Image (spheres, grey):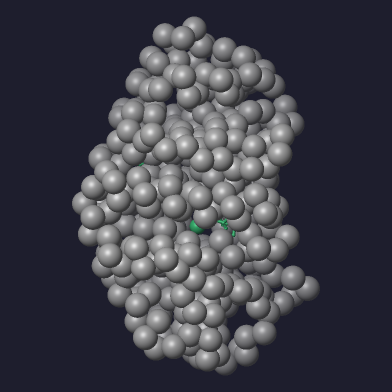
């Protein structure tokens, strides 16, 4: 088993990565404030893993209640969140009752937001079961639901008490979802870890084949990168914005397509290429570097061309991005592989050309 930590002083927490972590009571129990938990999952993950986790907790005298949500990004909204609150009210959950997110990033983001708001702040634990959630969304405390016209628009920063990553759960994950998770993995290489990008070029097929060593390494290295950024800038005043590479474009794709058809990781993959196209046109990235990014995304099985959304519509959704400041769009761009920067100085013609190149 691998262990690392997110260093946030009193609110620091561990990340455990390994096979069988889902039923390792000795990892979870020390992070419960009282012997009570509410497990939040969805209709796909419940039949696979809910009983296993429930049994493990009940064997150790923990009272477990659970709620099973509908599956899909389009359900990451108020109506679904209400189901969580209803369960908390019905079961008389207390402020010290731990919410446990068992599922992908959608379940994780909604459970985290429910925990942030339940009785003004309850503890929660992340048990991520998709690659994307294991390498990104379960770490760092961004929690949210979507607005129909804006991705993750309603949310809070609320850190989990622990992140328990069971790599065995990837065995049941559909290949398309595994590929989507790889977009965020590649992101870390691009924004701050050139050596990791090189490593991914050498090990992409091994990761896709779920070879245990390479998979665990890719998850650990991703979590380490994310933990370092979050520890340095928990609430995105500066450096944390780099974790948003490709997201201004990607969120526009997700919102513009109604949160169906495009997986988050797929939209981020195209978004990272749009950011790279802007960087190329500014002279910050050369053709060979752009080709390496595209080549790795293709090998991961990710799209490199966006949906047929008109450029004006893309710009409309992008104008609602959370990084917009004083009405000015701020974009994360690349100054080479492994070095990202935030800038508000992109000429509109360059931005339009870059989006068009990948639409
Ligand atoms: N908070 C953050 O920092 C952060 C970071 C990245 C992404 N996100 C958010 O995460 C979400 C995307 O997460 P995701 O890619 O995990 O999508 P997801 O939560 O929709 O999960 C993808 C699919 O896999 C299924 N699934 C989950 N685990 C499974 C398993 N082990 N076996 C079989 N099926 C399984 C789910 O039911 C779903 O159908 C987006 O809403 C995105 O905005 C948040
Ligand atoms: O943790 C972060 O910070 C990120 O930006 C990680 C992203 O991969 C993630 O998709 C996040 O939810 C985006 O945040 P948002 O504030 O742009 O909605
Ligand atoms: Zn993301």
Q: Is residue 179 above or below residue 350?
A: above
Quadrant of picture, ligand 2: bottom right
Q: Residue at x 59, y 43 (%)?
A: 6
Quarter of the rendering occupied by the N terminus: top left
In this view of the protein, which residue sits in the foreground, 38 or 26? Answer: 26
Counting from the top left corner in percent of width and height, residue 265 is at: 41, 59
Residue drawn 48% across and 24% down? 27
- The answer to whether residue 111 is seen in the rendering is no
Residue drawn 52% across the image and 91% down it: 283
Image coordinates of residue 131 in percent, x first then y, are: 38, 48
Identify the residue at horizontal 54%, vertical 80% (top origin).
Answer: 335
Number of dots carrying numbers: 0
Determine whether 44 is above or below 229 in the image. Answer: above
Decide if residue 233 is on the left or right side of residue 335: right
Quadrant position of the C terminus in the picture: bottom left
Residue 167 vs 202, above or below: the answer is above
Residues 255 and 248: in front is: 248
268 on left or right of 86: left
- Res. 32 visible in picture: yes
Camera-side residue of 290 and 302 = 290
Where residue 345 sits: x, y (%)? 67, 84
Is 213 displayed left or right of 98 in the figure?
left
């Amino acid at each position: 088993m691998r262990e690392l930590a997110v260093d946030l002083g009193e609110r620091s927490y561990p990340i455990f990565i390994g096979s069988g972590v889902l039923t390792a009571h000795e990892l979870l129990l020390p992070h419960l404030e009282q012997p009570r938990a509410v497990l939040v999952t969805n209709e796909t993950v419940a039949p696979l893993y809910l009983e296993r986790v429930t049994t493990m907790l009940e064997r150790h005298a923990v009272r477990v209640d659970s709620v099973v949500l509908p599956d899909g990004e389009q359900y990451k909204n108020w109506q679904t969140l209400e189901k969580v609150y209803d369960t908390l009210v019905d079961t008389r959950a207390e402020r010290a009752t731990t919410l446990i997110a068992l599922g992908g990033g959608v379940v994780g983001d909604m459970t985290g937001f429910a925990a942030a708001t339940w009785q003004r702040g309850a503890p929660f634990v992340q048990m991520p079961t998709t690659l994307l959630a294991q390498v990104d969304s379960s770490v760092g405390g961004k929690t949210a639901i979507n607005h129909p016209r804006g991705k993750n628009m309603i949310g809070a920063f609320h850190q989990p008490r622990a992140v328990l990553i069971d790599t065995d759960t990837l065995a049941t994950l559909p290949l398309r979802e595994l590929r989507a998770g790889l977009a965020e993995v590649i992101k870390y290489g691009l924004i701050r870890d050139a050596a990791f990008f090189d490593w991914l070029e050498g090990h992409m097929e091994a990761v896709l084949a779920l070879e245990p060593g390479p998979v665990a390494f890719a998850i650990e290295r991703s979590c380490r990168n994310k933990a370092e950024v979050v520890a340095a800038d928990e609430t995105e005043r500066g450096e944390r914005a780099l974790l948003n590479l490709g997201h201004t474009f990607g969120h526009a794709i997700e919102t513009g397509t109604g949160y169906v058809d495009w997986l988050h990781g797929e939209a981020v993959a195209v978004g990272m290429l749009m950011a790279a196209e802007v960087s190329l046109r500014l002279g910050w990235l050369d053709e060979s570097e752009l080709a390496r990014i595209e080549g790795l995304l293709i090998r991961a099985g990710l799209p490199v061309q966006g949906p047929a959304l008109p450029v004006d519509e893309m710009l409309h959704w992008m104008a609602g991005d959370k990084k917009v400041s004083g009405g000015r769009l701020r974009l994360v761009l690349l100054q080479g592989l492994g070095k990202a920067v935030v800038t508000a100085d992109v000429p509109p013609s360059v931005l339009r050309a870059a989006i068009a190149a990948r639409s």
